[in-house]
Image (cartoon, coloured by chain):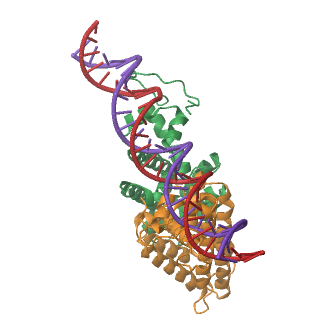
Chain colours: A orange, B green, C red, D purple
Amino acid sequence: MHTPTLMPPRRRGRPPKSRDALTDTRELLLRAGLETLTEKGFATAGLDEILGRVGVPKGSFYHYFASKEAFGLALIERYAHFFARKLDRHLLCAELTPLARVQAFVDDAQAGMARYDYRRGCLIGNLGQEMGALPESFRAQLQAVFADWQARLAACLRLAQQADEMSVTADAEQLAAFFWIGWEGAVLRAKLAQSAEPLTVFARFFLAGLPR
Amino acid sequence: MHTPTLMPPRRRGRPPKSRDALTDTRELLLRAGLETLTEKGFATAGLDEILGRVGVPKGSFYHYFASKEAFGLALIERYAHFFARKLDRHLLCAELTPLARVQAFVDDAQAGMARYDYRRGCLIGNLGQEMGALPESFRAQLQAVFADWQARLAACLRLAQQADEMSVTADAEQLAAFFWIGWEGAVLRAKLAQSAEPLTVFARFFLAGLPR
DNA sequence: TTTTTTCGAGACGCTCAGTCTAATATTGGT
DNA sequence: ACCAATATTAGACTGAGCGTCTCGAAAAAA
């Protein structure tokens, strides 16, 4: 069962102090977890699968994480952070008009999904869908992440209003909420259809529907 | 473990010919499966849980269904049928203008989610999200269901164009696609937030964004 | 009646997730 | 240089769920 796919055999005992990001076990686990959970979700993702992927034994896992639940919460945090950075990179890009920034984000996300053949979705969306079977502790976390994304997008939309790309009477906050509500649906459909079309369709009509 | 919750103890042996919908075992299983899968999804839903809920032993299950996968496919079919009827009830309602019919569907769905405290979502959306871990046979089925819903809504939107509620230059088919893409996201968020707000927000902006 | 068909009952094996304990290597203090 | 404390790996262990199988019982058909 253990097929340390491409990692060198791991050494026992307390490790030397210096660990780079490529050998740090905790780091490895988080990365592998992210990949697996974005593809399969929380409940379906087997520990053994994640472990096998990076050749880490179970003992190590439970050294770094108190439980699968704790692991999940750590992943949310990490993913939220990663995503917020990506969002900022686009939505704060001074070289583009505010609405062009939104489109830039969409293009980026699209490329991201294509890169993995539309097998991986959005961790937050995946887990949100699974709330029915997830520890209740996840709910607040996930909602907080959405609130954060919404705030970032709303700020960009307000800039769009200032730049006269959109009516100043519109409610930027609500529009941002609308975007993320629908976006998660688009990601889900893209996974199902194994195509970028749902993403482009959603983005196109979102932008087209914005009050002038 | 077996707590035949509220069903009478089932009788052994070949059953009499007449079975009403309340005692037919296959029917019972499908109903219970629908409840559980809309809450939890496919992978998470344990057979034992579904079985325990209606007091049906495993032997019966595997008498009626070749596998959990076959059961899932049967559920998709049944849910799609149920939903198509609901859709028609609203979208073909002659007493309302076409766009009012869309709103009527939204209101209905909203009430439906509230009835179960926002724990149950859309079976098709749930399974779609899980495709990464589902038998590939599900994919085509699920996409077909979405295509069907899209066609029904598109027809309604074309009526809206004829009734001059919406620009005749708009692409009704694409708009219908847009609706379902986002709607699934809204259902997902409603489950997460345990509130109808995502549904209303999505519907409001969808209708408001329609080209005049 | 006798035979055949239909279905319910639940034990069984297998796989796999998640937990826990023991073993092993490194560090830091003296 | 040694020893204690610490960090990490190794893998055994438990329990749950899926799918199978055999058997039992009752209605239907002959």
- Between B100 and B200, the one lying in front of the other is B200
- Between A190 and A138, the one lying in front of the other is A138
Residue at 58% of width from left, 93% of height from top?
A95
Q: Is residue B126 above or below residue C9?
A: below
How many numbered discs sit on the rendered protein? 0
Asked whether, in this view, residue B91 is left or right of residue A149, the answer is left
Percent coordinates x, y for residue B198 in the rendering: 63, 61
Does the rendering let one see residue A141?
yes
Asked whether, in this view, residue A84 is left or right of residue A32, the answer is right
Percent coordinates x, y for residue A118 in the rendering: 43, 69
Q: Residue furthest bottom?
A: A95
Q: Quadrant of the C terminus of chain B?
A: bottom right
Percent coordinates x, y for residue A204 in the rendering: 50, 76
- Between B72 and B27, the one lying in front of the other is B72
Does the rendering let one see residue B206?
no
Q: Quadrant of the N terminus of chain B?
A: top right
Q: Is residue B112 above or below residue B193?
A: above
Q: Is residue A6 above or below residue A20?
A: above
Residue at 65% of width from left, 88% of height from top?
A163
- Between B141 and A128, the one lying in front of the other is A128
Percent coordinates x, y for residue D15 in the rendering: 56, 42
Q: Quadrant of residue B66?
A: top left
